[in-house]
Image: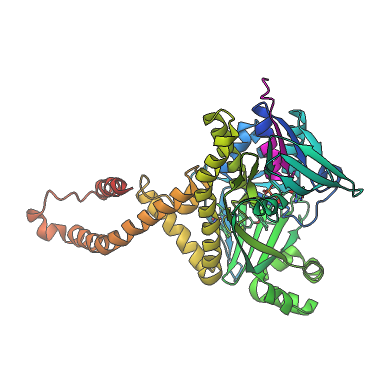
Amino acid sequence: MATTGQEIVIVGGGLVGALNACFLAQRGFKVSLYEMRADIRTQLHVKGRSINLALSRRGREALKMVGLEDMVVENGIPMHARMIHDLDGTRRPIPYGEKHQYIMSVDRKHLNEVLLNAAEQKGIKLLFEHKLIRCDFDRGMVIFERADESQVTVSCDLIIGCDGAFSAVRNQMMKRTRLDYQQEYIPHGYVELTIHPKQNQFAMEVNYLHIWPRNEFMMIALPNQDKTYTTTLFMPFKNFESLKTKDDIIEFFQKYFPDSIPLLEEENIKETMSSTPAQPLISIKCHPYHVGTKGLIMGDAAHAMVPFYGQGMNAGFEDCIVLDELMDEYKNDFTKVLPAYTEKRHVDATAICELAMYNYIEMRSSVNSKLFLLRKKLDNFLQKLFPKSWIPLYTMVSFTRTRYHQCIERRKTQDKIIRCLSYSIIPLVVGVTVIVTKRNEIGQYISDIPLNISQLKISLDRFIHRFL
Ligand SMILES: Cc1cc2nc3c(=O)[nH]c(=O)nc-3n(C[C@H](O)[C@H](O)[C@H](O)COP(=O)(O)OP(=O)(O)OC[C@H]3O[C@@H](n4cnc5c(N)ncnc54)[C@H](O)[C@@H]3O)c2cc1C
Ligand SMILES: COc1ccc2c(c1)CN(c1nc(C(=O)N(C)c3cc(Cl)c(F)cc3C(=O)O)c(Cl)s1)C2
């Protein structure tokens, strides 16, 4: 493969850094990837990370572009629907859409290992236990501290920070350019519990994203290949802190998640909840994503979001596609690519950060299982009624590559149309109903009105589609 001669240092060997390295090596750059932690491939379990994640369309497209989609998907578990757990233990499935519209539950560690192995196979130099401490964005130099506290200085043509929400590269950028930055910790934290197999079988329906929506509290469970479910409890820190004793813990689960107790097993709930500190959730937005012609940040380093759309990794993977496309457009000229990247990606990354936060606020304030069901069923009903013009927001976000900011714009238009239709459609439906039911008495006057509902639906769909 032709090499460009340019050298790129990627800081951070997590999901986005490792994938980005594959994209850039594929373009012929000489890539070195520096990761602060030890090589996860030599470790049994990496602590403090969500154990599995929902991979959807944007992330799969990126993996496909470096030839890794099949390898990741074959180890994932498809989730065709949500399974809503009601307080009384009733379970109701809500499909994500058509048969081909499903998301994947993938193991984080396995995904990271696949990406690191692929990077190594593409000739990328991986250096672990190298913690970035300083960048010189003018001269293209980075200084790393090694496990033995010695330092090493590396020079390169481009530094890309994929070092996560608490990015050191971003901190260095702040000293060098007018970088606007805002962060918000939400009042909720999370604890991960595990549902183990029962008689060596999955303890719940497999191909579902299980949800226990309880307004202020929520639990989500995604299946793993080993027949366990990683179950994440989201709750305000003040509520975690109020569970002082193991009895408090069990009483809480009996009150809000009674059906989950036999699944999670009482002893495990008590043990995990009393020994695991709740992890914080942070939302970070910043601008710009580049400095000069030698510094760039991507993934959570640029846009960390609360997980209430399951898009953080998918958005970071899509960042790699956007950069790759701009490298094509500007023929690897970093002086053009970097500003173009900020220009193009910032509006979308900000949009998904805000969408995720909005969904968190909505879920926390008003969504219990009845309302969650109703909203999703209405979405699915309208999509069936007006397939060309009504696309639920979650469908645009998780099953298309519609730019995130355009998902929001489209949703606003759809909301306007639905509002105006609801002022006119209701009288229309009432009118049609009256006509249909009273047709015999008044038939001689109105024989030519299209009483065929499907004709009416098609013309209404065409009418709406004109607005979008
Ligand atoms: C509870 C929870 C559930 C989630 N669920 C989903 C989901 O279902 N779907 C989804 O798409 N996303 C999900 N996410 C978001 C997803 O985990 C992140 O968006 C994703 O991990 C970001 O990847 P990244 O590589 O940008 O950052 P990270 O994964 O944080 O990786 C950054 C890497 O940089 C390294 N590093 C940090 N500082 C330095 C330094 N100074 N020097 C060298 N290396 C450094 C770190 O060790 C780490 O390996 C979830 C997040 C949470 C918290
Ligand atoms: C590992 O930890 C986590 C934590 C949270 C999430 C995930 C994994 C994966 N998540 C997904 N969210 C959507 C989505 O679009 N919406 C609107 C939803 C948002 C919430 Cl909060 C929810 F509970 C269901 C849906 C839903 O529609 O199923 C997907 Cl599609 S996947 C959230």
Residue 415: in magenta span: no
Farthest right residue?
Answer: 148
Q: On the rendered structure, is 326 left or right of 227? A: left
Residue 187 in the image, given as x and y percentages of width and height: 63, 71
The region drawn magenta spans 1-21
| Residue name at image x 24 percent, y 61 percent | 424
Nearest to the observer: residue 437 or residue 167: 167
Residue 198 in the image, given as x and y percentages of width and height: 76, 56
Farthest top residue?
Answer: 2
Residue 11: in magenta span: yes
Q: How many numbered marks are there?
A: 0
Specify whether residue 82 is in view.
yes
For the N terminus, the image quarter is top right
User: How was this image coloured?
Assistant: rainbow
Residue 252 in the image, given as x and y percentages of width and height: 69, 76
Quadrant housing residue 120: top right
| Residue name at image x 69 percent, y 73 percent | 237
Farthest left residue?
Answer: 445
Q: Is residue 423 above or below residue 386?
A: below
Nearest to the observer: residue 121 or residue 253: 121
Specify whether residue 74 is in view.
no
Q: Is residue 122 above or below residue 387?
A: above
